[in-house]
Image (tube, rainbow, N blue to C red):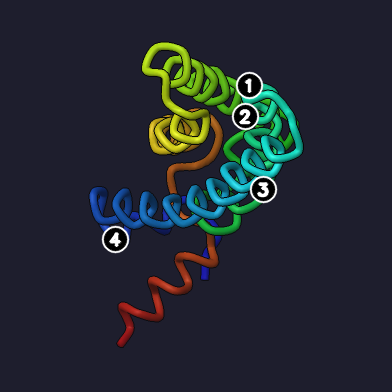
């Protein structure tokens, strides 16, 4: 099995993109569970909703970084240092989007902070997928995902 970033060409453009998005939904879903669960735990502990939102987002982002390159993307487009910096820049934009959405839902609509958090998660998920795919990682699936695809197509 090659680890070259051209492996996804075997799938075709839209099929590879769709599969990668599904894999990232899994990555994002696990990260969202940590994000929302951490948010609720921090709120329960008496932390204000903006601080709780930022804290849980950061914890989920750290998990997301590792899951992203294991399950959804191929590393090596940039040096590791540059990759981490780019990842956090994309994530900081996501944090800004997240915080604005939570704040707007709470202050403008009058909903509970958890409602704002739940509304923010899918919006930020789409941004994070696009940002990671375009600005951080190779657009191709990582070797582990390609191995699964290759085994399934060999059947």
As helix, strand or loop, the secondary structure at mark 3 comes to helix
Crowding near the residue tagged with mark 1, few <14, some 14–19, many ≥20 C-alpha atoms within 10 Å: some
Query: Marks 3 and 2, how far apart in space?
Result: 16 Å
Would you name the residue on which mark 1 appears?
Answer: 50
Residue positioned 66% across, 27% down in the render: 54
Find disc 3 in the rendering and name its residue: 63
For marks 4 and 2 on the same chain, the one whose residue lies earlier in the sequence: 4
Q: Quadrant of residue 83?
A: top right
In the depicted structure, whether residue 23 falls above or below residue 57:
below
Which dot, 4 or 2, sits closer to the camera?
A: 2
Label ID, residue 11: 4
Asked if labels 2 and 1 touch by Cβ distance under 8 angstroms, the answer is yes
Q: In 3D space, how far apart are the residues under numbered discs 1 and 3 (Cα atoms)? A: 20 Å
Which x, y percent locates residue 39? 63, 38
Outermost residue on the bottom side: it is 155
Reading the image, the residue beneath label 2 is 53
Give me the C-alpha separation between circle 1 and circle 2. Answer: 5 Å
Q: Residues within 10 Å of mark 3 (few under 14, many from 20)?
A: some
Q: Position of residue 102 (x, y in %)?
A: 49, 23
């Amino acid at each position: 099995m090659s680890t070259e970033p051209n492996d996804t060409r075997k799938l075709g453009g839209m099929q590879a993109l769709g599969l990668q998005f599904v894999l990232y939904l899994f990555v994002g879903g696990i990260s969202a569970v940590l994000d929302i669960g951490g948010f609720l735990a921090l709120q329960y502990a008496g932390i204000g909703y903006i601080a709780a939102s930022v804290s849980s987002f950061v914890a989920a982002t750290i998990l997301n970084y590792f899951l992203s390159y294991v399950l959804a993307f191929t590393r090596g487009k940039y040096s590791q240092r540059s990759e981490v910096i780019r990842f956090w820049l994309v994530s900081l934009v996501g944090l800004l989007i997240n915080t604005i959405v939570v704040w707007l839902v709470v202050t403008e609509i009058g909903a509970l902070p958890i409602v704002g958090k739940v509304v923010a998660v899918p919006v930020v998920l789409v941004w994070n997928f696009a940002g990671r795919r375009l600005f951080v990682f190779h657009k191709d699936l990582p070797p582990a995902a390609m191995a699964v695809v290759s085994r399934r197509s060999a059947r």
